[in-house]
Image (tube, grey):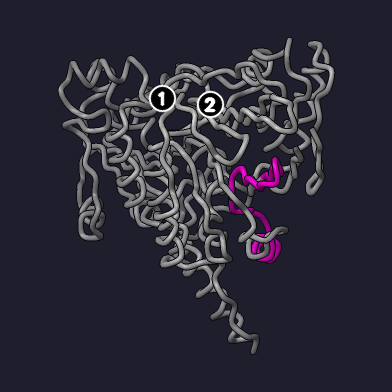
Amino acid sequence: MKIHFIGAARTVTGSMHLLEVNGSRILLECGLFQGKRNESYERNRNFPFDPAKIDAVLLSHAHIDHSGNLPNLVKQGYEGKITATRATTHLVKIMLRDSGHIQESDIAYANKKRAKKGLPPMEPIYTLEDAEKVAGYFQSVEYDDPVQIVEGVRATFMDAGHILGSAGIALDIEEKGRKFRLWFSGDIGRHSVPILRDPVLPINADYLMMESTYGDKAHRDPALAYDELREVTKKTIERGGKIIIPSFAVGRTQELAVFLHQMMVKGEVPRVPVYVDSPLAINASQIFNEHPECMDAETLADIRTRGHAALDFKEITYTRSVAESKAINEYRKPAIIISASGMAEAGRILHHLRNNIKDPRNTILIVGWQAPYTLGRRLADRETKVRIFGETFIRKAEVETINGLSAHAGQKMLIEYASAVKEQVKTVFLVHGEDRGALPLQKELKMKGFKDVRYPKPDTVFEI
């Protein structure tokens, strides 16, 4: 068997690995590469292999850096199945539709600028129509239920605890009289996060491909993030303000909703309206409610006790229409507004920031990492002058940041993950990590007795 490390090799984006086994070609993930505009456009349009010659695709979870280039793969001739858990299949369909819309919008904007320079128009990597076609290629599987992928390869999807439906994939391979297990981690979650079950650790793996995003540091306890959210919420409501939260639509929004519900039920904060104002986040929340098989025992017990879905409660309102979104800004009492995008670069969050940024009673709450040069980063840096929709605003609202809500495992959990197969594993491959995350993890694993820990360069091939 050969492993081709194509995407998410020495980087954290564009996850894509190609396996050659028994004459078949299996693609692990097909994510969008995200980086400089021109480089991303070329890398995502052009695969380093013929999509028509791929026999199967396995998908660990729905995040766009793992699934986002599937429409282009199909567009260029892929005709096989895309195998994923039921929840991932459900979730990725809406995320690809959203991605297709973004691809079209981004190219339309770029072409306006190109036209002014006399340059020819560009084509989107794929369209909304292309994204919708992918739905017919999915094969949904249950956790822990082996499925034959190609000759000599069975796959078993194990809960990864990262986002809804996420999975580590155990590949049991028989080739040329040999039998061995390759375990692909996908993205690894954390212990004791809301809603989701804890990650399943590798079992009987001869070879381990695992993420290394935060291999350099430990994460803070999610309980500390809960405490910080409670204090910010209480303080803002007491002074009559609103809390405006730019949030990623899948995972982070649902985690915040659960935390806020718990606080209100316990009487830790006043009961005020909670608005989720993002069509993608709303659709994702509905999908969360439809997949109890992914939920932890605490969430399931809470559903039974309270008699409603995990993300439905009296104070929460999901606003789908533009009119409903605009009406939120007419509400003059304390409230919590959770809206996309997570880095405040597009979407309805911009309207809420514009309408609330000048009121010192309000709080803008940053709950995730913000990329350089984004509005979210400028807010996180407490800049007093920011531009929204081309207009300069003087920020008077307070800015608070909460760490500890990452959906990725930190160094301690990554070491625990690999250590589950320390006595058996022959080689550990560190993927989905930059140097700052992977190299410290590689060093730690070697110090703990792992004999062969590799950090493959892009486009390298390893033969088993």
> Within 10 angstroms of label 2, few (less than 14), some, or many (20 or more) residues?
many
Which residue is rendered at x = 61% and y = 30% of the image? 171
Check disc 1: other Cα within 10 Å, few if <14, some if 14-19, many if 20+: many
What's drawn in magenta, residue-wise? 17-43
Point out the image quarter for the C terminus: top right
Q: Position of residue 361 (x, y in %)?
A: 34, 39
Q: Closest to the observer: 56 or 238?
A: 56
**Residue 242 shows up from this direction:** no
Q: Is residue 400 above or below residue 96?
A: above
User: What percent of the width, then of the height, locates residue 61?
Assistant: 50, 39
Along the line of sight, the residue nearer the viewer: 263 or 70: 70
Query: Is 18 included in the stretch rendered in magenta?
Result: yes
Q: Is residue 255 magenta?
A: no
Point 73% across, 26% down: residue: 178
Q: Which residue is mark 1?
A: 196
- Measure how far apart labels 1 and 2 are at the Cα level: 9 Å
Q: Quadrant of the N terminus?
A: top right
Please say whether residue 213 is visible from this viewpoint: yes
Q: Is residue 318 above or below residue 224?
A: below
Numbered label attached to residue 189 = 2
Percent position (x, y) of residue 445? 77, 18
**Callout 1: SS:** loop
Q: Amino acid at mark 1?
A: Leu
Asked if the residues shown at circle 1 and circle 2 are in contact, with their CB atoms under 8 angstroms apart, the answer is: yes
Left or right of 358: which side holds 404?
A: right
Asked whether, in this view, residue 310 is left or right of residue 211, the answer is left
